[in-house]
Image: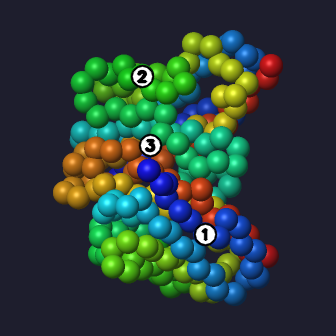
Amino acid sequence: AQSVSQHNHHVILSEAASLELGCNYSYGGTVNLFWYVQYPGQHLQLLLKYFSGDPLVKGIKGFEAEFIKSKFSFNLRKPSVQWSDTAEYFCAVKAYNTDKLIFGTGTRLQVFP
Amino acid sequence: EAGVAQSPRYKIIEKRQSVAFWCNPISGHATLYWYQQILGQGPKLLIQFQNNGVVDDSQLPKDRFSAERLKGVDSTLKIQPAKLEDSAVYLCASSLGGVRGTSNYGYTFGSGTRLTVV
């Protein structure tokens, strides 16, 4: 069965600091990978997704993620965070031959001015 | 395009009562999902519809939860009777779906219904 691990449960940063959130998945076959963001009081929004090709994926708001197949990882990065990035971030995986999206437990990011 | 609509936004009920949530997906989206998001956890898939047929309901507690998708469009999720541990946000999402393995589109989520069981 597929599963997703997000080891950072709560991250606190100052503005302009760099961000890296870890995501590891367990599944032996081809996967599609996603990062979603949930701002306080809002619905889940897609930040970026990987299906194939260049393993370095760029998303909205300056976020990027790198798929490392050998490590089963899809870490999210941003070189310089802003206060407005305060939110909960979810990594998700979908096996290529299904429509089922499996989420990690999420990482709560707090950015202080 | 209009997003995924859900109602109500909030619901407070007593345990053993029943409750129903409604979802209207994006027009033309064949696949509809209901997720349960308990505080501090990631969303967990409860049920997946392809048009008006159930594709996956393996994690739906069928003794108390039921869902239907009439005419392959709107969907309702019902809990009867509710338990304290059902307190969560219930999210609806939709995607173009279709043939398995070709739903290479981001899912669109609704704002969710926050259920509190007291």
Q: Are marks 2 and 3 on the same chain?
A: yes
B42 or A58, which lies in front?
A: A58
Give the secondary structure at mark 2: strand
**Residue at the far left in the pictured view:** B99
| Residue that numbered label 2 is attached to | A58
Q: Amino acid type of disc 2?
A: Lys
Residue B14 image offset from top left, x and y in percent? 76, 82
Q: Identify the residue at horizontal 39%, vertical 77% (top origin).
A: B69
Residue B30 image offset from top left, x and y in percent? 30, 63
Mark 1 and mark 3 residues within 8 Å of each other at the beta carbon: no
Rendered image quadrant of residue B90: bottom right
Quadrant of the image for the C terminus of chain B? Answer: bottom right
For residue B7, the mark is: 1
Residue B27 image offset from top left, x and y in percent? 37, 61
Mark 1 and mark 2 residues within 8 Å of each other at the beta carbon: no
| Residue that numbered label 3 is attached to | A92
Real-space Cα separation, disc 2 to disc 3, in angstroms: 16 Å
For residue B33, the mark is: none
Q: Are marks 1 and 2 on the same chain?
A: no
**Label 1 neighbour load within 10 Å: few <14, some 14-19, many 20+:** some
Q: Closer to us: mark 2 or mark 3?
A: 2
Real-space Cα separation, disc 1 to disc 3, in angstroms: 25 Å
